[in-house]
Protein backbone atom coordinates (compact mmCIF):
# COMPACT_ATOMS: atom_id res chain seq x y z
CA UNK A 1 0.00 0.00 0.00
CA UNK A 2 1.31 3.43 -0.87
CA UNK A 3 1.76 6.00 1.85
CA UNK A 4 2.00 9.73 1.36
CA UNK A 5 2.61 11.87 4.43
CA UNK A 6 3.36 15.59 4.45
CA UNK A 7 5.78 16.14 7.29
CA UNK A 8 7.00 19.69 7.73
CA UNK A 9 8.71 22.63 6.09
CA UNK A 10 12.39 23.49 6.26
CA UNK A 11 11.59 26.47 8.46
CA UNK A 12 9.87 24.24 11.00
CA UNK A 13 12.90 21.96 11.01
CA UNK A 14 15.08 24.95 11.82
CA UNK A 15 17.16 24.41 8.66
CA UNK A 16 17.76 26.81 5.85
CA UNK A 17 16.98 25.55 2.37
CA UNK A 18 20.69 25.36 1.56
CA UNK A 19 21.26 23.29 4.68
CA UNK A 20 18.56 20.89 3.58
CA UNK A 21 20.53 20.30 0.38
CA UNK A 22 23.59 19.00 2.14
CA UNK A 23 21.93 17.30 5.12
CA UNK A 24 22.49 13.90 3.51
CA UNK A 25 24.82 11.07 4.37
CA UNK A 26 28.27 11.69 2.83
CA UNK A 27 27.07 15.02 1.33
CA UNK A 28 26.34 13.38 -2.02
CA UNK A 29 25.61 16.02 -4.67
CA UNK A 30 24.19 14.90 -8.02
CA UNK A 31 23.49 18.06 -10.03
CA UNK A 32 21.68 18.69 -13.30
CA UNK A 33 20.73 21.80 -15.31
CA UNK A 34 17.48 22.09 -17.26
CA UNK A 35 17.46 24.10 -20.47
CA UNK A 36 15.39 27.32 -20.44
CA UNK A 37 12.19 27.69 -22.40
CA UNK A 38 12.92 27.22 -26.10
CA UNK A 39 12.85 30.37 -28.21
CA UNK A 40 11.26 29.55 -31.54
CA UNK A 41 10.65 31.42 -34.79
CA UNK A 42 8.93 34.79 -35.25
CA UNK A 43 5.90 35.03 -37.54
CA UNK A 44 5.17 38.36 -39.21
CA UNK A 45 1.55 38.23 -40.33
CA UNK A 46 0.92 39.50 -43.85
CA UNK A 47 -1.36 42.52 -44.05
CA UNK A 48 -4.20 42.64 -46.58
CA UNK A 49 -4.62 45.53 -48.99
CA UNK A 50 -7.71 47.70 -48.59
CA UNK A 51 -10.44 47.46 -51.23
CA UNK A 52 -11.26 50.82 -52.87
CA UNK A 53 -14.35 51.96 -54.74
CA UNK A 54 -14.60 55.36 -56.43
CA UNK A 55 -17.52 57.36 -57.73
CA UNK A 56 -19.22 60.73 -58.08
CA UNK A 57 -22.48 62.02 -56.63
CA UNK A 58 -24.50 64.59 -58.62
CA UNK A 59 -28.00 65.97 -58.39
CA UNK A 60 -29.02 63.64 -61.22
CA UNK A 61 -27.22 60.58 -59.77
CA UNK A 62 -27.57 61.04 -56.05
CA UNK A 63 -27.25 57.32 -55.20
CA UNK A 64 -24.32 55.06 -56.05
CA UNK A 65 -24.16 51.29 -55.44
CA UNK A 66 -21.19 48.87 -55.37
CA UNK A 67 -21.04 45.09 -54.88
CA UNK A 68 -18.63 43.65 -52.34
CA UNK A 69 -18.06 39.96 -51.53
CA UNK A 70 -16.52 39.21 -48.13
CA UNK A 71 -13.66 36.67 -48.41
CA UNK A 72 -13.72 35.72 -44.70
CA UNK A 73 -16.07 35.71 -41.74
CA UNK A 74 -15.38 38.64 -39.47
CA UNK A 75 -15.24 42.39 -39.13
CA UNK A 76 -14.87 44.84 -41.99
CA UNK A 77 -14.53 48.59 -41.72
CA UNK A 78 -16.21 50.92 -44.29
CA UNK A 79 -15.03 54.52 -44.70
CA UNK A 80 -16.16 57.25 -47.10
CA UNK A 81 -13.23 59.47 -48.05
CA UNK A 82 -12.35 62.42 -50.31
CA UNK A 83 -15.75 64.13 -49.93
CA UNK A 84 -15.65 67.91 -50.54
CA UNK A 85 -15.95 70.09 -47.46
CA UNK A 86 -19.32 71.60 -48.44
CA UNK A 87 -20.89 68.25 -49.38
CA UNK A 88 -22.53 65.51 -47.34
CA UNK A 89 -23.15 61.84 -48.11
CA UNK A 90 -24.24 58.77 -46.12
CA UNK A 91 -23.06 55.18 -46.29
CA UNK A 92 -25.13 51.98 -46.09
CA UNK A 93 -24.23 48.31 -46.47
CA UNK A 94 -27.03 45.85 -47.23
CA UNK A 95 -26.97 42.07 -47.37
CA UNK A 96 -28.46 40.05 -50.24
CA UNK A 97 -31.93 40.39 -48.71
CA UNK A 98 -31.74 44.17 -48.59
CA UNK A 99 -31.27 44.30 -44.84
CA UNK A 100 -28.90 46.98 -43.65
CA UNK A 101 -25.86 45.87 -41.70
CA UNK A 102 -24.60 49.36 -40.89
CA UNK A 103 -26.27 52.54 -39.61
CA UNK A 104 -26.34 55.62 -41.91
CA UNK A 105 -22.96 57.09 -40.94
CA UNK A 106 -19.34 56.80 -41.95
CA UNK A 107 -16.35 54.94 -40.45
CA UNK A 108 -18.25 51.89 -39.24
CA UNK A 109 -17.33 48.21 -38.93
CA UNK A 110 -19.71 45.31 -39.18
CA UNK A 111 -19.66 41.51 -38.98
CA UNK A 112 -19.91 39.96 -42.46
CA UNK A 113 -20.16 36.35 -43.62
CA UNK A 114 -17.64 34.77 -45.95
CA UNK A 115 -18.68 34.47 -49.63
CA UNK A 116 -21.75 36.64 -49.04
CA UNK A 117 -22.17 39.54 -51.49
CA UNK A 118 -23.14 42.88 -49.96
CA UNK A 119 -24.30 46.12 -51.57
CA UNK A 120 -22.49 49.29 -50.56
CA UNK A 121 -24.73 52.34 -51.03
CA UNK A 122 -23.66 55.99 -51.00
CA UNK A 123 -26.47 58.61 -50.88
CA UNK A 124 -26.22 62.33 -51.51
CA UNK A 125 -27.49 64.75 -48.91
CA UNK A 126 -26.00 68.02 -50.15
CA UNK A 127 -23.61 69.09 -52.88
CA UNK A 128 -21.86 67.47 -55.81
CA UNK A 129 -18.69 65.57 -55.04
CA UNK A 130 -16.34 62.82 -55.98
CA UNK A 131 -15.74 60.23 -53.27
CA UNK A 132 -14.00 56.96 -52.53
CA UNK A 133 -14.99 54.05 -50.28
CA UNK A 134 -12.25 52.25 -48.39
CA UNK A 135 -12.98 48.74 -47.11
CA UNK A 136 -10.51 47.53 -44.51
CA UNK A 137 -10.47 43.78 -44.44
CA UNK A 138 -10.87 40.96 -41.99
CA UNK A 139 -7.70 38.88 -42.24
CA UNK A 140 -7.85 35.09 -42.52
CA UNK A 141 -7.27 32.99 -39.40
CA UNK A 142 -3.54 32.31 -38.98
CA UNK A 143 -2.26 28.91 -37.84
CA UNK A 144 0.43 29.11 -35.17
CA UNK A 145 2.59 26.05 -35.79
CA UNK A 146 4.94 24.35 -33.33
CA UNK A 147 7.96 26.28 -34.62
CA UNK A 148 6.44 29.70 -33.80
CA UNK A 149 6.69 31.51 -30.48
CA UNK A 150 6.39 35.21 -31.43
CA UNK A 151 3.61 36.77 -33.53
CA UNK A 152 4.02 40.23 -35.04
CA UNK A 153 0.76 41.72 -36.28
CA UNK A 154 -1.13 45.01 -36.25
CA UNK A 155 -4.48 46.78 -36.15
CA UNK A 156 -5.48 49.14 -38.96
CA UNK A 157 -9.02 50.02 -37.85
CA UNK A 158 -10.90 50.45 -34.59
CA UNK A 159 -12.75 47.32 -33.52
CA UNK A 160 -10.53 44.99 -35.59
CA UNK A 161 -10.10 41.37 -34.47
CA UNK A 162 -7.24 39.11 -35.57
CA UNK A 163 -7.75 35.36 -35.20
CA UNK A 164 -5.21 32.57 -34.69
CA UNK A 165 -5.35 28.81 -34.13
CA UNK A 166 -2.99 27.00 -31.80
CA UNK A 167 -2.54 23.32 -30.85
CA UNK A 168 -0.43 22.67 -27.71
CA UNK A 169 2.13 19.87 -27.78
CA UNK A 170 2.07 19.22 -24.02
CA UNK A 171 -0.58 19.49 -21.31
CA UNK A 172 0.16 22.46 -19.09
CA UNK A 173 0.26 26.22 -18.64
CA UNK A 174 0.68 28.54 -21.62
CA UNK A 175 1.22 32.26 -21.14
CA UNK A 176 0.34 34.80 -23.84
CA UNK A 177 2.62 37.74 -23.18
CA UNK A 178 2.59 41.05 -25.06
CA UNK A 179 6.09 42.39 -25.70
CA UNK A 180 4.61 45.37 -27.55
CA UNK A 181 1.09 46.75 -27.27
CA UNK A 182 -1.59 45.55 -24.84
CA UNK A 183 -4.75 44.55 -26.72
CA UNK A 184 -7.49 42.34 -25.32
CA UNK A 185 -7.55 38.60 -26.00
CA UNK A 186 -10.03 35.74 -25.75
CA UNK A 187 -9.41 32.01 -26.26
CA UNK A 188 -11.76 29.08 -26.85
CA UNK A 189 -11.57 25.44 -27.91
CA UNK A 190 -12.99 23.73 -31.01
CA UNK A 191 -16.43 23.60 -29.36
CA UNK A 192 -16.45 27.29 -28.54
CA UNK A 193 -15.80 26.65 -24.83
CA UNK A 194 -13.40 28.74 -22.81
CA UNK A 195 -10.76 26.58 -21.01
CA UNK A 196 -11.96 25.89 -17.44
CA UNK A 197 -8.67 27.07 -15.91
CA UNK A 198 -7.62 30.60 -16.80
CA UNK A 199 -4.73 31.93 -14.75
CA UNK A 200 -4.13 35.51 -13.76
CA UNK A 201 -1.97 37.49 -16.16
CA UNK A 202 -2.85 36.04 -19.59
CA UNK A 203 -2.21 32.34 -19.00
CA UNK A 204 -4.35 29.26 -19.59
CA UNK A 205 -4.06 25.59 -18.68
CA UNK A 206 -4.46 23.83 -22.04
CA UNK A 207 -4.71 20.24 -23.23
CA UNK A 208 -2.28 18.71 -25.70
CA UNK A 209 -3.78 17.85 -29.09
CA UNK A 210 -6.75 20.23 -28.72
CA UNK A 211 -7.03 22.99 -31.30
CA UNK A 212 -7.73 26.38 -29.74
CA UNK A 213 -8.70 29.62 -31.44
CA UNK A 214 -7.80 32.94 -29.92
CA UNK A 215 -8.87 36.39 -31.00
CA UNK A 216 -6.83 39.53 -30.37
CA UNK A 217 -9.13 42.56 -30.11
CA UNK A 218 -8.29 46.18 -30.83
CA UNK A 219 -9.19 48.29 -27.79
CA UNK A 220 -7.79 51.77 -28.37
CA UNK A 221 -4.47 50.13 -29.23
CA UNK A 222 -4.11 50.93 -32.92
CA UNK A 223 -0.89 49.98 -34.64
CA UNK A 224 1.53 47.06 -34.33
CA UNK A 225 1.73 44.57 -31.47
CA UNK A 226 3.96 41.62 -30.63
CA UNK A 227 2.56 38.55 -28.89
CA UNK A 228 4.81 35.85 -27.44
CA UNK A 229 3.51 32.38 -26.55
CA UNK A 230 5.41 30.97 -23.57
CA UNK A 231 4.97 27.21 -23.91
CA UNK A 232 4.89 24.45 -21.32
CA UNK A 233 8.23 22.65 -21.08
CA UNK A 234 8.42 18.86 -21.08
CA UNK A 235 8.64 17.11 -17.73
CA UNK A 236 12.16 16.12 -16.65
CA UNK A 237 13.07 12.98 -14.66
CA UNK A 238 15.01 14.11 -11.57
CA UNK A 239 15.28 10.72 -9.85
CA UNK A 240 18.79 10.41 -8.41
CA UNK A 241 19.55 14.15 -8.49
CA UNK A 242 19.94 16.32 -5.42
CA UNK A 243 20.29 19.71 -7.16
CA UNK A 244 18.27 20.77 -10.22
CA UNK A 245 19.08 24.15 -11.82
CA UNK A 246 16.13 25.63 -13.70
CA UNK A 247 14.30 28.93 -14.26
CA UNK A 248 10.89 30.57 -14.54
CA UNK A 249 10.77 33.06 -17.38
CA UNK A 250 7.18 34.30 -17.39
CA UNK A 251 4.09 34.68 -15.25
CA UNK A 252 2.41 31.41 -14.29
CA UNK A 253 5.14 29.20 -15.76
CA UNK A 254 5.02 25.63 -14.47
CA UNK A 255 8.08 23.40 -14.57
CA UNK A 256 7.32 19.71 -14.04
CA UNK A 257 9.62 16.95 -12.84
CA UNK A 258 9.00 13.23 -12.44
CA UNK A 259 10.48 11.42 -9.46
CA UNK A 260 10.52 7.74 -8.43
CA UNK A 261 11.49 6.93 -4.87
CA UNK A 262 14.51 4.57 -4.79
CA UNK A 263 13.84 3.52 -1.17
CA UNK A 264 11.32 3.87 1.65
CA UNK A 265 11.66 7.09 3.58
CA UNK A 266 11.28 10.85 3.76
CA UNK A 267 12.07 13.01 0.75
CA UNK A 268 12.31 16.79 0.71
CA UNK A 269 11.69 19.11 -2.26
CA UNK A 270 12.77 22.72 -1.76
CA UNK A 271 13.39 25.72 -4.00
CA UNK A 272 16.12 28.28 -3.38
CA UNK A 273 17.59 31.31 -5.16
CA UNK A 274 20.41 31.80 -2.63
CA UNK A 275 23.16 30.46 -4.87
CA UNK A 276 21.90 31.84 -8.21
CA UNK A 277 21.37 35.56 -7.41
CA UNK A 278 17.75 35.66 -8.55
CA UNK A 279 14.45 37.17 -7.41
CA UNK A 280 12.33 34.30 -8.76
CA UNK A 281 9.25 33.53 -6.66
CA UNK A 282 8.07 29.92 -6.78
CA UNK A 283 5.60 27.50 -5.22
CA UNK A 284 6.09 23.77 -4.80
CA UNK A 285 3.34 21.30 -5.66
CA UNK A 286 3.48 17.50 -5.58
CA UNK A 287 0.99 15.18 -7.30
CA UNK A 288 0.65 11.41 -7.19
CA UNK A 289 0.53 9.24 -10.32
CA UNK A 290 -3.26 9.75 -10.50
CA UNK A 291 -2.89 13.53 -10.64
CA UNK A 292 -4.19 14.10 -7.10
CA UNK A 293 -2.45 16.90 -5.21
CA UNK A 294 -0.43 15.61 -2.28
CA UNK A 295 0.80 19.01 -1.16
CA UNK A 296 1.27 22.61 -2.19
CA UNK A 297 3.44 25.13 -0.45
CA UNK A 298 4.00 28.84 -1.04
CA UNK A 299 7.08 29.04 1.15
CA UNK A 300 9.78 27.23 -0.72
CA UNK A 301 9.29 23.52 -0.14
CA UNK A 302 8.15 20.60 1.94
CA UNK A 303 8.74 16.94 2.72
CA UNK A 304 6.81 13.79 1.91
CA UNK A 305 7.08 10.14 2.96
CA UNK A 306 7.23 7.66 0.06
CA UNK A 307 7.54 3.94 -0.38
CA UNK A 308 10.18 2.56 -2.72
CA UNK A 309 8.85 2.67 -6.25
CA UNK A 310 6.28 5.43 -5.60
CA UNK A 311 6.12 7.88 -8.50
CA UNK A 312 5.21 11.55 -8.04
CA UNK A 313 5.14 14.69 -10.16
CA UNK A 314 6.90 17.69 -8.64
CA UNK A 315 5.62 20.94 -10.15
CA UNK A 316 7.29 24.30 -9.55
CA UNK A 317 4.95 27.24 -10.26
CA UNK A 318 5.99 30.83 -10.79
CA UNK A 319 4.21 32.84 -8.09
CA UNK A 320 1.29 35.14 -8.97
CA UNK A 321 1.93 38.42 -7.24
CA UNK A 322 0.34 41.87 -7.34
CA UNK A 323 3.21 43.43 -9.28
CA UNK A 324 2.28 41.25 -12.32
CA UNK A 325 5.14 38.89 -11.59
CA UNK A 326 7.50 40.53 -14.07
CA UNK A 327 10.32 40.86 -11.51
CA UNK A 328 9.53 37.54 -9.85
CA UNK A 329 11.10 35.47 -12.61
CA UNK A 330 14.61 34.13 -13.00
CA UNK A 331 16.75 31.16 -12.00
CA UNK A 332 16.20 28.88 -9.04
CA UNK A 333 17.50 25.59 -7.66
CA UNK A 334 15.27 22.66 -6.79
CA UNK A 335 16.96 20.87 -3.89
CA UNK A 336 16.01 17.24 -3.25
CA UNK A 337 16.84 15.45 0.01
CA UNK A 338 16.79 11.67 0.34
CA UNK A 339 16.46 9.29 3.31
CA UNK A 340 19.47 7.42 4.67
CA UNK A 341 18.13 4.25 3.03
CA UNK A 342 18.72 5.80 -0.41
CA UNK A 343 22.36 6.81 0.12
CA UNK A 344 23.82 3.71 -1.55
CA UNK A 345 21.63 4.40 -4.57
CA UNK A 346 22.79 8.03 -4.69
CA UNK A 347 26.46 7.12 -4.38
CA UNK A 348 26.28 4.78 -7.40
CA UNK A 349 23.84 6.87 -9.44
CA UNK A 350 24.89 7.68 -12.99
CA UNK A 351 23.20 10.45 -15.04
CA UNK A 352 20.99 9.09 -17.77
CA UNK A 353 20.06 5.93 -15.86
CA UNK A 354 16.80 5.12 -14.12
CA UNK A 355 15.64 2.67 -11.50
CA UNK A 356 14.44 0.41 -14.29
CA UNK A 357 18.02 0.25 -15.63
CA UNK A 358 18.98 -1.82 -12.57
CA UNK A 359 16.54 -4.57 -13.54
CA UNK A 360 17.91 -7.47 -15.67
CA UNK A 361 17.16 -7.45 -19.36
CA UNK A 362 15.02 -10.56 -19.87
CA UNK A 363 15.87 -10.45 -23.57
CA UNK A 364 19.57 -11.16 -22.76
CA UNK A 365 19.88 -14.90 -21.82
CA UNK A 366 23.34 -14.48 -20.27
CA UNK A 367 22.22 -11.66 -17.97
CA UNK A 368 19.04 -13.51 -17.03
CA UNK A 369 21.09 -16.63 -16.16
CA UNK A 370 23.48 -14.58 -14.03
CA UNK A 371 20.61 -12.89 -12.22
CA UNK A 372 19.04 -16.28 -11.52
CA UNK A 373 22.32 -17.57 -10.01
CA UNK A 374 22.61 -14.47 -7.82
CA UNK A 375 19.12 -15.05 -6.50
CA UNK A 376 19.95 -18.72 -5.77
CA UNK A 377 23.09 -17.74 -3.82
CA UNK A 378 21.17 -15.14 -1.85
CA UNK A 379 18.62 -17.82 -0.95
CA UNK A 380 21.37 -20.26 0.13
CA UNK A 381 23.03 -17.55 2.21
CA UNK A 382 19.74 -16.78 3.92
CA UNK A 383 19.26 -20.51 4.76
CA UNK A 384 22.76 -20.73 6.23
CA UNK A 385 22.09 -17.66 8.35
CA UNK A 386 18.94 -19.30 9.71
CA UNK A 387 20.92 -22.47 10.63
CA UNK A 388 23.61 -20.37 12.30
CA UNK A 389 21.01 -18.57 14.40
CA UNK A 390 19.54 -21.92 15.55
CA UNK A 391 22.98 -23.27 16.40
CA UNK A 392 23.83 -20.24 18.49
CA UNK A 393 20.57 -20.63 20.43
CA UNK A 394 21.50 -24.30 21.26
CA UNK A 395 25.02 -23.27 22.31
CA UNK A 396 23.56 -20.66 24.59
CA UNK A 397 21.15 -23.13 26.19
CA UNK A 398 23.92 -25.63 27.13
CA UNK A 399 26.10 -22.87 28.54
CA UNK A 400 28.98 -22.89 26.08
CA UNK A 401 30.77 -19.64 25.39
CA UNK A 402 31.51 -19.38 21.69
CA UNK A 403 32.23 -16.16 19.79
CA UNK A 404 31.93 -15.41 16.08
CA UNK A 405 35.74 -15.64 15.87
CA UNK A 406 35.57 -19.40 16.68
CA UNK A 407 33.77 -19.84 13.33
CA UNK A 408 36.35 -17.92 11.40
CA UNK A 409 38.88 -20.01 9.52
CA UNK A 410 42.41 -18.76 9.15
Image (spheres, rainbow, N blue to C red):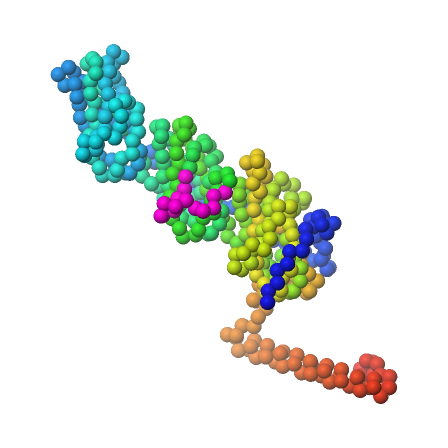
- On the image, the x and y values in percent for residue 51 come to 25, 29
Residue at coordinates 25% horizontally, 30% vertically from top-left? 101
Q: Residue at point 71% right, 50% down?
A: 12
Residue 74 left/right relative to 263: left
Q: Is residue 191 magenta?
A: yes
Q: In which quadrant will I find the C terminus?
A: bottom right
Residue 111, position as x, y percentages in the image: 29, 34
- Principal secondary structure, stretch drawn in magenta: loop
Residue 399 percent location from the top left of the image: 86, 86
Point out the image quarter for the N terminus.
Answer: bottom right
Residue reaching furthest to the top: 86
Q: Nearer the viewer, residue 158 or 257?
A: 158
Identify whether 55 is placed above or below 305: above
Whether residue 301 appears in this view of the structure is yes
| Residue in view at x 16 percent, y 16 percent | 58
Count of numbered badges drawn on the protein: 0
Q: Is residue 175 magenta?
A: no
Q: Which residues are magenta?
A: 186-199
328, 153: nearer the viewer? 328
Identify the residue at the far bottom of this view. Answer: 398
Q: Is residue 221 above or below residue 3?
A: above
Q: Is residue 199 left or right of residue 382?
A: left
Amino acid sequence: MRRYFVLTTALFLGLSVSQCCVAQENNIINEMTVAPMEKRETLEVEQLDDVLFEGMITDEENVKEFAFTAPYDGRYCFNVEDVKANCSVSLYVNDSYGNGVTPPNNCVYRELEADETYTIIVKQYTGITEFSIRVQMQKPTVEITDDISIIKDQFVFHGQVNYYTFCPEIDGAYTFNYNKGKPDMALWDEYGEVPPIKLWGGAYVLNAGTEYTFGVYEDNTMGPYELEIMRQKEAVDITGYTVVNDSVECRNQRNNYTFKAPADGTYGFYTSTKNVNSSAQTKVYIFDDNGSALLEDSYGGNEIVLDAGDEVLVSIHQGNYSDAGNNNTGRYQLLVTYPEEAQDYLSTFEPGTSLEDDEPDSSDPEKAQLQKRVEELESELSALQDKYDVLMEIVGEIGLEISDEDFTQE
